[in-house]
Image (spheres, coloured by chain):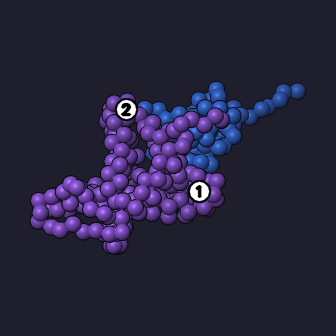
């Protein structure tokens, strides 16, 4: 029997991101950073898709998506 | 998570707002909120000020988060559009230069010092209770009244959007944030 495990990750809509960095401090795993003052970027190796950043994001440009 | 010294900068922002009710000349300190983010954006090409050091953002986050004064709803799409953000930045700039021009008029003795705070660029509130005179030129005080008006107006707008939308909604259309992101765009091409 194969077990299909779906991973949840935070995905940033970088075109609309205002790079305010509100997400940085709420992430317990330090998995999200603001790249060069342009937009937020998620470290997919660290992100567990908990959704804290998505809830904090004032522009609501972070979504939790299921990835294979 | 262990708190760092910069996690307490909301106290500085709060004290700044309070000091403006006692002696308007403290308003000059607000220039730090203009020059530090610009300095970081120009020298480091990052928006680290917004994410780590912005005391105002922390204050909204505290009031809207821990104190529960926010509906925590999504901000409307038009408010995060580039047109609105850059439009608001330009409007803010124009009003800032109008304020600087008024300061210039007082410095050149063409106009008398007005001991008022203008809220939301419209409502004039008598503010002489926070002015005890200055050893310097009255123009120095005029700038303080004008600058504190800018700071108070943006705090009020920030509080309104904090209540209506998410705690740090101000960050979406904050003119300093838009400007530093623009600088980073230019520098990181």
Q: State the separation of the CA atoms marked 1 and 2.
A: 30 Å
- The chain assigned the colour purple in the figure is B
Q: Quadrant of the C terminus of chain B?
A: top left
Does dot 1 land on a helix, a strand or a loop?
Answer: helix
Residue B128: horizontal and vertical position, in percent? 32, 69
Q: Quadrant of residue B165?
A: bottom right
Tell me which chain the residue with mark 1 is part of.
B
Q: Quadrant of the N terminus of chain B?
A: top right
Tell me which chain the residue with mark 2 is part of.
B
Depicted B111 relative to depicted B103: above or below: below
Number of the front mark, 1 or 2:
1
Name the residue carrying label 2: B45
Could you tell me which residue is drawn at 40 percent across and 61 percent down? B22
Neighbour tally class for label 2: few under 14, some 14-19, many 20 plus, Cα within 10 Å: many
Q: Nearer the viewer, residue B73 or A5?
A: B73
Could you tell me which residue is drawn at 32 percent across and 51 percent down? B28
Is residue B88 in view from this perspective?
A: no
Q: Which mark is residue B64?
A: 1
Q: Residue furthest right?
A: A1
Q: Quadrant of residue B181?
A: top left
Could you tell me which residue is drawn at 64 percent across and 26 percent down? A45
Circles 1 and 2: CB atoms closer than 8 Å: no
Q: Quadrant of residue B44?
A: top left
Residue A54: horizontal and vertical position, in percent? 61, 46
- The chain assigned the colour blue in the figure is A
Depicted B171 relative to depicted B42: above or below: below
> In the picture provided, is A53 more to the left or to the right than B105?
right
Residue A8: horizontal and vertical position, in percent? 69, 37
């Amino acid at each position: 029997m194969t077990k299909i495990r779906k991973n949840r990750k935070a995905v940033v809509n970088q075109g609309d991101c205002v790079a305010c960095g509100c997400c940085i401090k709420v992430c317990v795993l330090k998995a999200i950073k603001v790249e060069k003052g342009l937009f937020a970027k998620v470290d997919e190796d660290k992100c567990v898709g908990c959704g804290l950043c998505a809830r904090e994001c004032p522009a609501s440009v972070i979504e939790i998506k299921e990835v294979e | 998570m262990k708190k760092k010294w910069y996690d307490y900068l909301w106290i500085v922002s709060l004290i700044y707002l309070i000091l403006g009710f006692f002696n308007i000349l403290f308003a000059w300190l607000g220039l730090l909120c203009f020059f530090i983010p610009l300095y970081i954006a120009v020298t480091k090409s990052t928006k680290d000020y917004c994410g780590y050091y912005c005391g105002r953002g922390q204050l909204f986050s505290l009031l809207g988060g821990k104190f529960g004064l926010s509906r925590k709803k999504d901000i409307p799409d038009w408010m995060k559009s580039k047109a609105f953000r850059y439009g608001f930045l330009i409007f803010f700039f124009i009003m800032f230069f109008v304020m600087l021009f008024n300061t210039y008029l007082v410095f050149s003795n063409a106009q008398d010092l007005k001991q008022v705070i203008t809220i939301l660029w419209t409502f004039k509130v008598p503010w002489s209770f926070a002015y005890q005179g200055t050893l310097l030129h009255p123009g120095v005080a005029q700038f303080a009244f004008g600058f504190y008006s800018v700071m108070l107006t943006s705090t009020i707008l920030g509080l309104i959007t904090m209540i209506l939308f998410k705690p740090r909604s101000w960050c979406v259309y904050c003119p300093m944030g838009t400007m530093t992101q623009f600088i980073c765009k230019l520098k990181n091409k």
